[in-house]
Amino acid sequence: MASYKDILNGTLRGLGDKVKEVSEAGGVKEIYTRGAERAKSYARAAKLSLEINGDSEELRKVYAEIGKLYFEQNEAAPGALYAGLFAQAEEIRARLKDKEAEIRAMRESFDAAQAEKAGDIEVEIGEFEDIVNATESDGQGQ
């Protein structure tokens, strides 16, 4: 029966022989070259993917601008093909106006509440100063 040491030595010799075989055949350089080329290809593919995403976003913006201009120019009389989309756009615009009006009302309410609180603070500060002054004059009399 082979000892653990013999098995380990045999495995290491086998690995050494494989390394020697690959290096003599010029395989290491070849493997490195193929790996470097593959890395360059992956980097190029990643760069192209980023460029595609950027170009797609730019195209989406151009399409949106075309649609906006068409909508503005034909709002009064959309063609039959666009009538449903125009109605949908009008519904969305109405919802936006309602929400903006609600926000304005909230801000006005908040501003009014802040102004009211500011008046309360001034009264409290005035009362505090009266108390301090009264205490001061009481202390001087003794």
Image (spheres, rainbow, N blue to C red):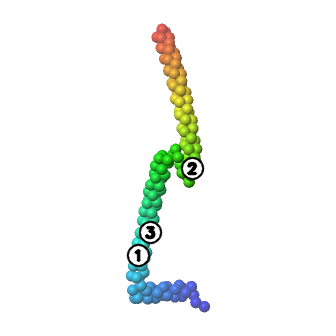
User: Mark 1 = which residue?
Assistant: 37
C-alpha distance separating marks 2 and 3? 42 Å
Name above or below for residue 95 compared with residue 117.
below
Q: Secondary structure at mark 3?
A: helix
Q: Label 2 to label 1, Cα distance in Å?
A: 54 Å
Residue depicted at 41% across the width and 85% down the height: 27
Mark 1 element type: helix
Q: Which mark is residue 83?
A: 2
Q: Which mark is residue 45?
A: 3
Going by the numbered disc 2, the residue's amino acid type is Ala
- 123 or 81: which is nearer to us? 81
Give the answer, above or below, for where 66 lies relative to 12: above
Q: Secondary structure at mark 2?
A: helix
Question: In this rendering, does residue 141 appear at all?
Answer: yes
Which residue lies at the image location 52% right of the left edge and 88% below the top edge? 10
Mark toward the start of the polypeptide (2 vs 3): 3
Amino acid at dot 3: Ala
Residue 3 coordinates in the image, percent (x, y): 57, 87
- Count the numbered circles shown: 3
